[in-house]
Image: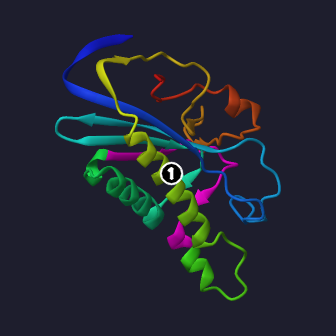
């Protein structure tokens, strides 16, 4: 663990909110209406306020937020904390059973004859507003911080390179749901093993 005193005056505040879509919403991966909530999905983050700027780090329990949806959420946070777009970082955890949000893709789906069901924009708008509201509430909780701690550790047998070089020189792909014992036993390959 690395520990150092901040060179500038900092204030920090955490935030979190529920980003679980409402039951009945058709969503990735099957686009069937959601009928079960295994556990709530959360957006968690931190606001870092310095003498010069505010920064927001946010991680969301979704598979993906893409294109216009991503830009809109970042801009909403920017406007909430009065900062610059380059100071807002939104990431998804990318579990494959969680929602995928891409309003551009859904606009294309809407042009198809007999399109499959897809989530409506109002669902995204309500969830994004919920995130912005939790960020706004956190602003009133900014607390002085004069110490930053950063930790890292090596993680084994969690990640692997999807491209596997076989003994015959061919490259094959293995996914996270791989069932082939030979591919499962192959070397991890070139990855960043540090958390």
- Front-most of 154 and 181? 154
Residue 90 higher or lower than 103, as above or below: above
Q: Position of residue 104 (x, y in %)?
A: 50, 72
- Front-most of 11 and 128? 11
Horizontal placement of 149 versus 15: left or right?
A: left
What sort of colour scheme is used for the picture?
rainbow
Within 10 Å of disc 1 (Cα), the crowding (few <14, some 14-19, many 20+) is: many
Horizontal placement of 155 versus 11: left or right?
A: right
The residue under the point 50% across, 59% down is 129
Q: Position of residue 161 (x, y in %)?
A: 54, 35
Q: Position of residue 107 (x, y in %)?
A: 55, 78
Horizontal placement of 54 versus 153: left or right?
A: left
Residue 158 higher or lower than 168, as above or below: above
Q: Which residues are magenta?
A: 88-105
The residue under the point 57% across, 30% down is 159
Q: Quadrant of the N terminus?
A: top left
Q: Please say whether residue 100 is one of the residues in the magenta stretch.
A: yes
Residue lying furthest front: 140
């Amino acid at each position: 663990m690395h520990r150092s005193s901040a060179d500038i005056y900092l204030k920090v505040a955490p935030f979190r909110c529920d980003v679980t879509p409402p039951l009945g919403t058709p969503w990735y991966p099957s686009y069937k209406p959601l009928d079960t909530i295994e556990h709530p999905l959360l957006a968690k983050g931190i606001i870092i306020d310095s003498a010069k700027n505010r920064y927001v780090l946010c991680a969301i329990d979704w598979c993906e937020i893409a294109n216009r949806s991503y830009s809109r959420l970042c801009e909403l946070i920017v406007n909430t904390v009065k900062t610059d777009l380059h100071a807002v970082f939104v990431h998804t955890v990318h579990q494959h059973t969680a929602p995928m949000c891409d309003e551009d893709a859904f606009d294309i789906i809407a042009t198809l004859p007999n399109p499959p069901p897809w989530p409506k924009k109002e669902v995204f708008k309500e969830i994004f507003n919920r995130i912005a509201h939790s960020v706004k509430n956190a602003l009133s909780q900014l607390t002085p911080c004069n110490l930053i701690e950063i930790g890292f550790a090596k993680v084994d047998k969690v990640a692997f390179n999807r491209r596997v070089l076989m003994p015959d020189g061919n490259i094959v792909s293995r996914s996270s749901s791989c069932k082939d014992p030979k591919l499962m036993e192959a070397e991890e390959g070139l990855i960043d093993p540090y958390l």
